[in-house]
Amino acid sequence: MKILIIEDEIPARKKLKRFLQDLDIKTEVVAELDTVAEAIDFLDTAGVDLIFSDIELLDGNAFEIYREVQVFCPIIFTTAYDQFLMNAFETNGIAYLLKPFSKDRFQNAWDKFLRLKKSASEENQQLYRITNLIQQTFAKKAYKEQFTIHAQQGIYFLKTELISYFEADEGVIFAFDTMGKKHVLNESSLKSVEAYLNPDDFFRINRSVLLKKHHIEKIERYTKNTVAISVKGTKNHLKTSQSNTAPFMQWIEV
């Protein structure tokens, strides 16, 4: 069980780790962070099973983290202030521990996490079965064959088969073709672009890049948990995030 602790008080971090060590389940604290900036950088490239998060950090409010980075795991908030209660449950918050909290309060929050995790696992299995059934029923879904590009010279069309990858940069979505040309799209996000594309052909390798399988020319190990990818039409290497590397390598083999 991988745990992330976001806490700027050393005694509070030690207390959490002591409580975690006393649990029946083996846990691993993968990182201890004390700033908003560090947490954003970490969560942009790594995934965990649970976050223990203080709210008032050295460089700002923790909710800045969860507005900037999409987090899929539950969060147990630990704070000395009760005015953030509603904000906590508008994110992925499942428990709100007011400092100084007891071991019993910690255990109650942990038990809630385990119940939700078990329930989510059962729901995911059911969803997987339903998704498979839908995919079998509608196997020939129509995907977007071209994108409309609005330029100063007028409107033109870019065929999807000629796109090497899409990239999000400061709120703007670009498509790069196999000749290395960069096209500005009208789409608001990579998520909206993904909805138009066949997942067998395109994969989101990190938060900002969505690439096409058939234009991949080379894959190399970049770090222990990431790879660098060469694609047709660009000299730059595209890099996977740590959390997406394993799914990407599975996808590329299909």
Image (tube, rainbow, N blue to C red):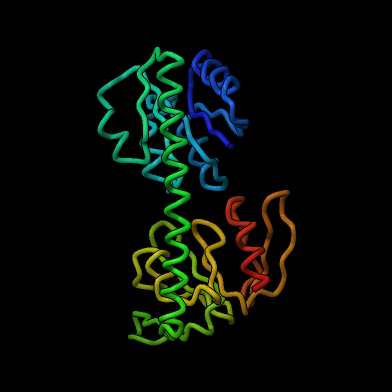
- Residue toward you, 157 or 129: 129
Q: Residue 239 at what x, y percent from top left?
A: 62, 58
Dividing the picture into quadrants, the one containing residue 171 is: bottom left
Residue depicted at 64% across the width and 57% down the height: 246
Confirm whether residue 209 shows in the render.
yes
| Left-right relation of 120 to 220 | left
Which quadrant holds the N terminus?
Answer: top right
Residue at the location (57% across, 74% down)? Answer: 212
Q: Report x, y in % for residue 77.
A: 39, 28
Give the answer, above or below, for where 216 lies relative to 99.
below
Residue 171 versus residue 11 in the image, above or below: below
Left or right: where 182 falls relative to 253? left
Mark yes or no: residue 237 visible. no
Give the image location of residue 3, x and y in percent. 55, 34
| Figure quadrant of residue 222 | bottom right
Position of residue 58 relative to residue 145, above or below, is above
- Is 149 positioned to the left or the right of 176 in the image? left
If the image is split into quadrants, where does the C terminus sit?
Answer: bottom right
Q: Position of residue 53 (x, y in %)?
A: 44, 29
Q: Quadrant of the rendered structure where residue 47 is? A: top right
Image label count: 0
